[in-house]
Every structure is written in C-alpha cells, then in structure tokens.
C-alpha cells in the first residue's frame, strides 16, 4: 500500500514502514513473511522484532550470511537463507521459494 508506506516514511522513517503496520494490525498466531537479500535491512529487522512482540511467527527469506535479521530469530521462527553474495541469485531463489510456499498454502487450503 503505497499511501501507507509513504505516510509512515514521511512521519517516522523508512526503517519503520513494516514495524508500524505490524504493531497496528498484527495478532498472535499471525505469520510474518519477511524478505531481505542482505539480512541487514533495518525495516525488516524492526518488523521481525515487532512481530515477535506480538507473538507472531516469522518466516525469513534471507541471503548472504544472514546478517542482523538472522540474529533476531528464535527457535519458533524459520529462516530460508540463500548463502550467496549475488543479489540477483538470492532474489531469483527467493522468487522460487515464494512460488513453493504459495503452492503449499494452496494445497493446504484447497486440497
């Protein structure tokens, strides 16, 4: 939602764009699907922290060495890391992972 992202970035900072939405809308039992190629995106790290404070589970699609985002995960969370220094390879792998996740969800919902 570009209006939400713009207003949060203008009134707070870009680092808060996902965190603020999670704090407003997140509930225990929800799942945060976070994506970062470096593991060091401040807005993703902040989103993970907010999700955990709301008792949400986190699935992190990550890259490189995992960065700061990987360090925030708990045993309840799941990290799918592409250990590549190439942003393009990481993004291509994340797209494939997202297609697989969608297929699993579809199968679970629609059998």
Image (cartoon, rainbow, N blue to C red):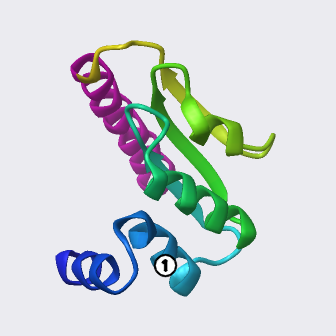
Residue 53, image quadrant: bottom right
Q: Main secondary structure of the magenta part?
A: helix
Neighbor class of circle 1 (other Cα within 10 Å; few <14, some 14-19, many 20+) is some
Residue 13 in the figure: left or right of residue 25 = left
Percent of width and height locating residue 110? 42, 54
Q: Nearer the viewer, residue 83 or 93?
A: 83
Residue 16, image quadrant: bottom left
Q: Nearer the viewer, residue 104 or 71?
A: 71
Question: What residue do we see at 37% from left, 73% from top?
Answer: 13
Percent of width and height locating residue 8? 34, 81
Q: In the image, is residue 78 above or below residue 41?
A: above
Q: Nearer the viewer, residue 105 or 51?
A: 51
Total tally of numbered discs in the picture: 1
Question: What residue do we see at 64% from left, 38% from top?
Answer: 78
Percent of width and height locating residue 104? 45, 40
Residue 67, image quadrant: top right
- Name the quadrant of the N terminus: bottom left
Question: What residue do we see at 63% from left, 65% from top?
Answer: 51
Secondary structure, mark 1, is: helix
Q: Which residue is mark 1?
A: 20
Instruction: State which region is magenta.
Output: 88-111
Q: In the image, is residue 35 above or below residue 12?
A: above
Residue 10 in the figure: left or right of residue 58 = left
| Magenta stretch holds residue 63 | no
Residue 5 in the figure: left or right of residue 63 = left
| Magenta stretch holds residue 110 | yes
Residue 111 in the figure: left or right of residue 103 = right
Percent of width and height locating residue 76? 77, 46
């Amino acid at each position: 939602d570009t209006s939400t992202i713009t207003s949060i970035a203008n009134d707070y900072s870009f680092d808060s764009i996902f965190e603020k939405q999670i704090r407003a809308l997140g509930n225990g039992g929800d799942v945060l699907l976070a994506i970062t190629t470096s593991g060091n995106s401040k807005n993703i790290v902040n989103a993970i922290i907010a999700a955990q404070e709301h008792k949400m589970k986190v699935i992190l699609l990550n890259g490189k060495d995992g960065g700061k985002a990987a360090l925030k995960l708990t045993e309840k969370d799941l990290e799918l890391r592409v250990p590549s220094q190439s942003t393009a390879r990481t993004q291509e792998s994340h797209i494939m992972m997202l297609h697989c996740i969608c297929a699993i969800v579809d199968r679970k919902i629609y059998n």
